[in-house]
Amino acid sequence: MRSAATRACRRSISGVRTMLELADVHCFYGAAHVIRGVSLKVQRGEVVALLGRNGMGKTTTMRSIMGLAPPQVKAGSIRWNDMSLLGLSAHEIAARGIAIVPQGRRLFPSLTVTEHLTMLKSPRASKGWTVARIFDLFPRLAERRHHRGGQLSGGERQMLAVARALMIDPELILMDEPSEGLAPVMVQHLEQIVLDLKREKLSILLVEQNLYSALATADRVYVMETGAIVREAPATALTQKPEQLLRYLGVQ
Ligand SMILES: Nc1ncnc2c1ncn2[C@@H]1O[C@H](COP(=O)(O)OP(=O)(O)O)[C@@H](O)[C@H]1O
Ligand SMILES: [Mg+2]
């Protein structure tokens, strides 16, 4: 059913700038059919927000892109620069230039900031991101370089999680609810970091429950409800009429 339309669609955007393209993806946890036909794309240099309430399937979508199991991807395609990612390990996917900042910013309580940044051997030839450059972008982490993960504030932990993702020199970063649980001033700081990374020509797929935070950085927005995309719109259209989306997101 989708073949002719999908081929035409891919032709029209192929060679343009589409980096990541999910087409009619279905994911399962055991017998639970959690992602039900998700299609989305991220173009080069774009910040794309994936919005939706708790339990709608945002993290599952991220995990399926990154090759993390569970879930199991049972149908559809996930393509990166027109090559299939299905069946590749998370390490192989990272080596192709996709990094993830997982929800809950998992860090090692006893390792220092510097150790977090140097423990990963990049699977890619390091083109640009060095610890020194990271510290330029995150002066707060530079000040805290000898602090251990367990001693950092929530905002500092989130910055370190983003910094770790950069150390693999990604072209696309998947960020899963980076603003969750942060004070408003830290949320604004993170928005600035996303804009800085966009200026560095990185593409970002940003999962958010906070519509306003997403609209501060995103070019385009998808809304997810019970495992499916129910809306897609340019962020500019939504900035004027955010109330259109609030019903999908519950009280903000
Ligand atoms: N490891 C898992 N095993 C079984 N079900 C899961 C697992 N992780 C998530 N789910 C279920 O999948 C659905 C989507 O979850 P998730 O992708 O985490 O949503 P979101 O990130 O949008 O909050 C939810 O119903 C959740 O309970
Ligand atoms: Mg989630």
Image (tube, rainbow, N blue to C red):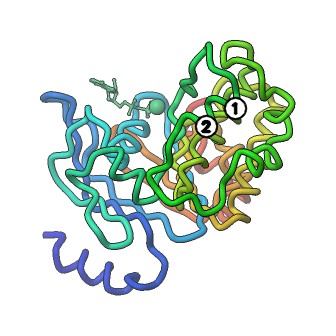
The answer to which of 248 and 221 lies nearer the viewer is 221
Residue receiving disc 1: 114
Q: Who's the residue at 28% across and 62% down the image? A: 23
**Separation of residues labelled 1 and 2 (CA atoms):** 6 Å
- Image quarter of the C terminus: top right
Tell me the quarter of the picture where residue 112 sits: top right
Amino acid, disc 1: Thr
Provide the secondary structure element on which disc 2 rests. Answer: helix
Residue at 46% x, 58% y: name it. 97
At 32% from the left edge and 73% from the top edge, which residue is drawn? 82
From where the camera sits, is residue 252 visible? no
Residue 238 location (% of width, % of height): 65, 58
Q: Which mark is residue 232?
A: none
Q: Is residue 14 above or below residue 224?
A: below
Label 1 crowd bin: few (<14), some (14–19), many (20+), radius 10 Å? some
Image quadrant containing the N terminus:
bottom left
Taking the spot 75% from the left edge, 28% from the top edge, the residue there is 156
- Numbered circles on residues, count: 2
Residue 189 percent location from the top left of the image: 81, 40
